[in-house]
Image: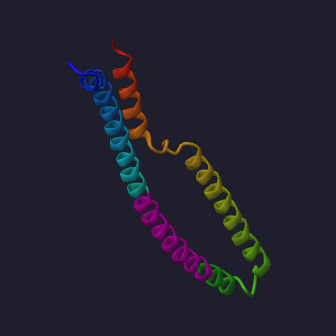
Amino acid sequence: MTDTQSQRHEHGPVRRLLGSAFAIIQTRLELIGIELAEEKERLLGVLFLGLAAMMLATMALIALTALIAIAFWDTWRWQALAGITLVYALAALVCALKARQGLRTAPMVFQATLEEFEKDREILRKP
């Protein structure tokens, strides 16, 4: 055997191992890309629905405020407006607390990718 042929045989397993490692990394990067695209679509959908809900709720609250103010204008005008303000403030506080809780309990981003990396690490640890 010549010197170059023996080097090829020695580097064969190393090249195959490196090729496999790069293939695994490429697959994981593709998975990250897919998860990013899915998360972007989900966030855009939620953002659109949230903005539409906020706009419609604002219009409903303006109409409700006007209705209550008109109904109590002659007798309890400032008490009615103070009651409406208190209800709005309490509702805003509840929404803020729920939003904070939602951010704290949000699922970890790239969970599937991290699980696949963990599986790869376990496979590579085995003799």
State which quarter of the image contains the C terminus. Answer: top left
Residue most extreme to the right: 78
Quadrant hosting residue 113: top left
State which quarter of the image contains the N terminus. Answer: top left
Q: Is residue 85 above or below residue 101?
A: below
Quadrant hosting residue 123: top left
Q: Is residue 20 above or below residue 63?
A: above
Q: Is residue 45 left or right of residue 79?
A: left
Q: Is residue 2 left or right of residue 45?
A: left
Q: Is residue 36 left or right of residue 20?
A: right
Residue 43 belongs to magenta span: yes
Residue 3 belongs to magenta span: no
Front position in the image: 53 or 41: 41
Residue most extreme to the front: 2
Residue 74, position in %: x, y? Answer: 74, 87
Magenta-tinted stretch: 40-63
Q: Main secondary structure of the magenta part?
A: helix
Residue 79, position in %: x, y? Answer: 77, 74
Front position in the image: 119 or 3: 3
Front position in the image: 80 or 123: 123
Q: Is residue 22 above or below residue 16?
A: below
Q: Residue at x 24, y 25 (%)?
A: 5
Front position in the image: 123 or 107: 123
Q: Residue at x 59, y 44 (%)?
A: 104
Q: Is residue 113 left or right of residue 58?
A: left
Q: Is residue 69 above or below residue 103?
A: below
Quadrant hosting residue 111: top left
Q: Residue at x 39, y 45 (%)?
A: 29
